[in-house]
Amino acid sequence: MTSDRATFPSRWDVRHVAETGSTNADLLTEARLGAPAGRVLVADHQTAGRGRMGRRWEAPPGASLLVSVLLRPREGLALHGATQAVGLAARSACTAVAGVTPDLKWPNDLLVGDRKVAGVLAEALADGGHVTAVVVGLGLNVNWPAELPPELVGIMTSLNHVAGRSVDRAALLDAFLRALDHRVTQWEEDPLALASDYRATLASIGRIVTVDTPAGPRTGRVTAVTDDGTLLVVAGDDTLEVQAGDLVYADG
């Protein structure tokens, strides 16, 4: 995978590797050593890719866009905005390059027809209770084989399956970083506008979902996402405020 560094917005310092364990883990290490905001790491293959809740993220070599971005947010900036910025940027890139517009699923997935095409994982570093860095990783299925592993059929998809053609990963990366440049600026300068744009494109609103609560799983309808990223779910006479966790669509 090659890409012209000159085409990227000046915010980004992009580096490529053929293979690594995890681009997120690598950038977290660099962040601890003082790497500046804007460092981007792209890999053709990950041997220890990670998703939320400690899950593994696996993909055939060269089949996905595997990219992590190092950000250093100012004090008080809500960290969920970093995940929203990456999700919105990835959605824009898919539209521009593949002609496919995924749905955003709270809190960190991109879906096509309720099948996962991408996931976002944000991990923070803190010092003395203050966040010093956030690394946000994107795993986007781009050119997967026609036949998926049996355990993934009906659960995931890939851009080439939906578009009916191969998709250029380099062009996708370029479009993603261009869109992310705008979204990170928005997060830094006008986070309420970012939250509004996220809500406007979030397909989870209105869906019947099952969420985990301290009292066990509850099923209800999503009515909103607040500016601080909290999901509101009406379940019977209760309005649940869900700040983190898994969300399972229960309406088909």
Image: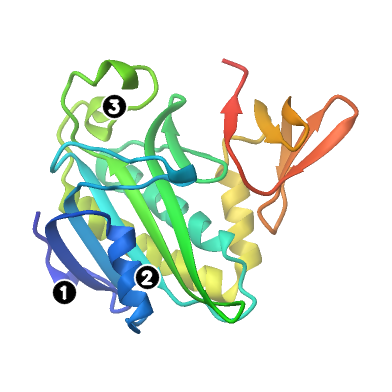
Residue occupying the point 32% across, 61% down: 25
Distance of label 3 from label 2 (alpha carbons):
30 Å
Q: Amino acid at mark 2?
A: Leu
Name the residue carrying label 1.
6
Q: Nearer the viewer, residue 152 or 163?
A: 152
Q: Which mark is residue 78?
A: none
The answer to the question of whether label 2 and label 1 lie on touching residues, with beta carbons closer than 8 A, is no
Q: Which callout, 3 or 2, points to the residue nearer the camera? A: 2
Assess disc 3: are there few (<14), some (14-19) or many (≥20) residues with their C-alpha within 10 Å of its C-alpha. Answer: some
Residue occupying the point 35% across, 40% down: 56
| Residue 3 image-quadrant placement | bottom left
The answer to the question of whether label 3 and label 1 lie on touching residues, with beta carbons closer than 8 A, is no
Distance of label 3 from label 1 (alpha carbons):
30 Å
- Local secondary structure at mark 3: helix
Q: Which mark is residue 162?
A: 3
Q: How is the image coloured?
A: rainbow
Q: Which callout, 2 or 1, points to the residue nearer the camera? A: 2
Horizontal and vertical percent position of residue 158: 28, 31
Among numbered discs 3 and 2, the one appearing first in the sequence: 2
Horizontal and vertical percent position of residue 241: 77, 44
Residue occupying the point 64% across, 55% down: 196
Horizontal and vertical percent position of residue 224: 72, 42
- Local secondary structure at mark 2: strand
Horizontal and vertical percent position of residue 58: 27, 38
Distance of label 2 from label 1 (alpha carbons):
19 Å
* 34 relative position to 15: left or right: right
* 226 relative position to 34: left or right: right
| Residue 178 image-quadrant placement | bottom left
Name the residue carrying label 2.
70
